[in-house]
Amino acid sequence: MALKHFLSVSDLSPAQAADMLVLADRIKREPAKYRKALEGQTLAMIFQKKSTRTRVSFEVGMYQLGGHALFLSATDIQIGRGETIADTARTISRYCNGIMARVFGHEILTELAEFASIPVVNALSDLEHPCQTLCDAQTLVEKWSPAGTFDVNVLKGRKLVYVGDGNNMAHSLLDTGAVLGMDVTIVAPKDYEPSPVILARSRQIALQTGAKLAVSNDPIEGVRGADCIYTDVWASMGQEAEQAKRVKDFAGFQVDEAMMQRANPGCLFMHCLPAHRGEEVSAEVCDGPRSIIFDEAENRLHIQKAILVSLMGTR
Ligand code: CP
Ligand code: NVA
């Protein structure tokens, strides 16, 4: 079934997720073939939160596909003065061909999708960050496929361990592992585990692919067998007031060289960025030879283009 919106990796069937990665790889290899894919189309980009990678990659991506992107800070448009999400969605649908939104509450996205007559993309909510984790999967497929090839099946039976807060990134990584058949363990301090509702949902999806999904509070044993260790900031956007408490609560959960040594040989290091060196990751690991953080950041561009072409390309 054709995809209408992209709010969650769990919206994708295993086949759709695999197809999205293959399309991203094709666009990356032959960008010129897609130069007119979205000719004359406009993407409205609503931001309630800050962004470097997402904003730049979506805007550049639309330009490279022959279209145009509008940056709309939520404080500058009428949403900031109380105009409803429903009216905003219906109005923007009369001018634009797609909406991407970075929001606090995930329900803002579901409301945009309900009232928009054009596709809506989740560019991060407090609950999920699906564009990021699809790009992470693309990056791992590149790293683990034989040179020159791109075989999505290489994810099967591999293990990604996410160490840190059970936040939007942890949720989307669980969904991504479930849909693509990669094992995912979330290692988080007590009281910072991922949502049990999301875990149950991704475990249900994993029945189709055989992915093993686990949660642990043990940063020593939890990383054993990891082929990739992933982390994210301890205090996400909107949680700045909790920063000092979180630094204390996450003691022992920094990804450092000693932790990398407990994982499988050749274990890769990933981070969605922005990174706080000296907190969730040591500078040595973040900038070391096993870190693939900028390959990841680059792939945001290619996966975003694949998402946009899939949603808007046939219109
Ligand atoms: N990883 C990510 O989404 O980065 P930005 O917050 O800079 O967009
Ligand atoms: N968990 C982080 C991800 C940033 C890309 C946040 O929500 O701030």
Image (tube, rainbow, N blue to C red):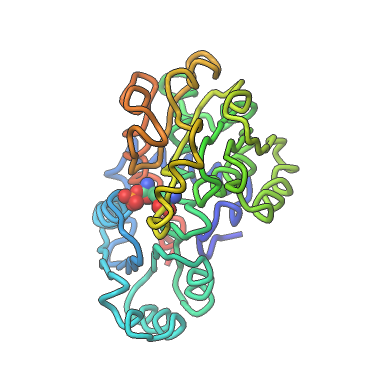
Q: Does any portion of residue 315 appear in the rendered image?
A: yes
The residue closer to the viewer here, 286 or 108, is 286
Q: Position of residue 235 (x, y in %)?
A: 42, 49
Query: What's the residue at 46%, 46% (across, down)?
Result: 246
In this rendering, the answer to whether 154 lies above or below 62 is above
State the residue at coordinates (53%, 70%): 107
| Viewer-proximal residue among 303 and 183 | 183
Quadrant (top left, top right, bottom left, bottom right) of the N terminus: bottom right
Q: Is residue 124 above or below residue 53?
A: below
Choose between 271 and 247: the one closer to the eye: 247
Residue 121, image x, y percentages: 44, 62
The image quarter containing residue 262 is top right
Residue placed furthest toward the top: 265
Image height of 241 relative to 33, above or below: below
Left or right for 200, reference 188: right
2 shown above or below 20: below
**Residue drawn 37% across and 70% down?**
97
